[in-house]
Image (cartoon, rainbow, N blue to C red):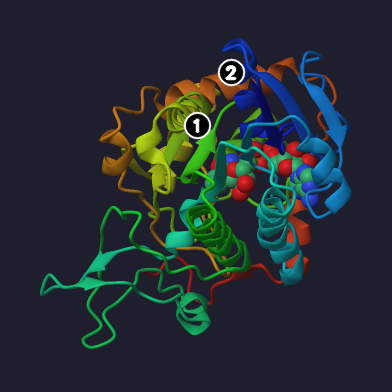
Amino acid sequence: MRVLVTGGAGFIGSHTVDALLEKGYEVTILDSLEKPVHLKGKPNYIPKEARFIEGDVRKRDDFLKALSDVQIVYHFAAYQDYLPDFSKFFHVNSVGTALLYELIVEKRLPIEKVIVASSQAVAGEGLYRNAAGHEILPPIRALKQLEAGQWELRDSQNGEILQWQSTPETVANPQNQYAMSKYSQEMIALNLGRRYGIPSVALRYSIVQGPRQSFYNHYSGACRIFSLAYFFNRAPLIYEDGAQMRDYVSIKDVVRANLLVLDDSRANGEMYNVGGGKSFTVKEFCAIVARVFEKEHLAPQIPGLFRFGDTRHSVSDISKLRSLGWEPQFTPQESVRAYREYLEEQTDIEDILEYAQEKMQSLNVVRTACKKGVV
Ligand SMILES: NC(=O)c1ccc[n+]([C@@H]2O[C@H](COP(=O)([O-])OP(=O)(O)OC[C@H]3O[C@@H](n4cnc5c(N)ncnc54)[C@H](O)[C@@H]3O)[C@@H](O)[C@H]2O)c1
């Protein structure tokens, strides 16, 4: 049986490719080797047993060629960033996914299952409760609030701080360009899949961690950013006040989830959060990275910068995936350790942290609050 993995040269895709080959599947990879993700060209971890097609999911001929003789599709190729080139998010993530279903239907391709990679970002600010215990789906925080260094979400009626909750799959409140494109991708996959009898599953990953995460993306990935800072013997930079809650999931657990939903037909037509099951503040996570790199003496800088469009707290409720028998098995400490090993194996890393930071600031994505550290 042949599986197509779009974005198979990337972080999650390549680990999934390895696991599929190990299970005896034949694999085709369709990947455009986007820069800056692949600043150094085709990664050497791509196995020679896989059929590699350098091509773009926006291009009909490339996708059609990649779909030849294929029965299963993992669709990981995506544009992910915080940069304001809004249309690119929809061209790659939404139109690319629509093209996949268009080709399957038009050419009557014998595809037995499609698994698409969505994101926790779709939930936006996620689920909150007010003091009276009522559920609230708050909108994005106002720029004025952030500029004043007021980080927490507040009740619009009485100004009280709202209490964050673990967010289930039923919540969709996408606020930024990436999240909106991922939400449309979920709808395309699940609704067109249902309508045309193509078993489809959408997986909303939390922050995924482990080796092969690109060093060169502009957008933040806490593990990569903090690890690179400590690797270069610098104090890492934390946005807002560092009290943002997040959940972090190991790439090994993600691959197990990817394979589980392939085999389990109960997953067809469903969406699942794939998260770490435990929440940490960004500051706590930074301390984990500092310990792993033995750089606890380098305290993080928290100068009151914020990234416009970021969510305050993002923690996924993973009970739905747990009901299929999946449980996260690896801790953030283990993921960071594996990332450190990977980082230390590299011979040609450029120090791009400052470059990425300056680029985001020049594009007005990262901004400074007037009153620093006020919550
Ligand atoms: N890494 C995370 O923490 C995380 C969290 C939530 C969701 N996701 C989703 O998981 C998927 C994989 O993410 P990742 O972290 O492995 O990213 P990645 O950047 O490492 O991999 C994505 C791959 O897609 C390829 N690609 C990009 N645009 C393409 C195009 N137009 N045509 C063909 N290939 C293209 C890139 O070259 C890259 O190899 C994405 O859909 C992403 O939105 C990732």
Camera-side residue of 298 and 250 = 250
- Classify mark 2 as within 8 Å of ligand 1 or not, answering yes or no: no
Q: Residues within 10 Å of mark 1 (few under 14, many from 20)?
A: many
Please state which amino acid type lies under the numbered disc 1.
Asn
Residue drawn at point x = 44 percent, y = 34 percent: 249
The quarter of the image holding the C terminus is bottom left
Disc 1: which residue = 258
- Could you tell me the amino acid type at mark 2? Ala
Query: Between 253 and 296, which is closer to the camera in this rendering?
Result: 253
Question: In the picture provided, is 219 more to the left or to the right than 308?
Answer: right
- Quarter assignment of residue 96: bottom right
Place of residue 5 in the rendered image (x, y in percent of width and height, measured from the top left): 68, 33
Q: Quadrant of residue 12?
A: top right
Residue 188 seen in the current view = yes
Closer to the camera, 61 or 179? 61
Image point (47%, 81%), residue name: 142
Q: Quadrant of ligand 1?
A: top right
> Mark 2 near mark 1, Cβ–Cβ under 8 Å?
yes
Query: What residue is shown with label 2?
Result: 19
| Picture residue at 53% right of the left edge, 50% below the top | 118
Number of marks:
2
Q: CA distance from mark 2 to mark 1?
A: 10 Å
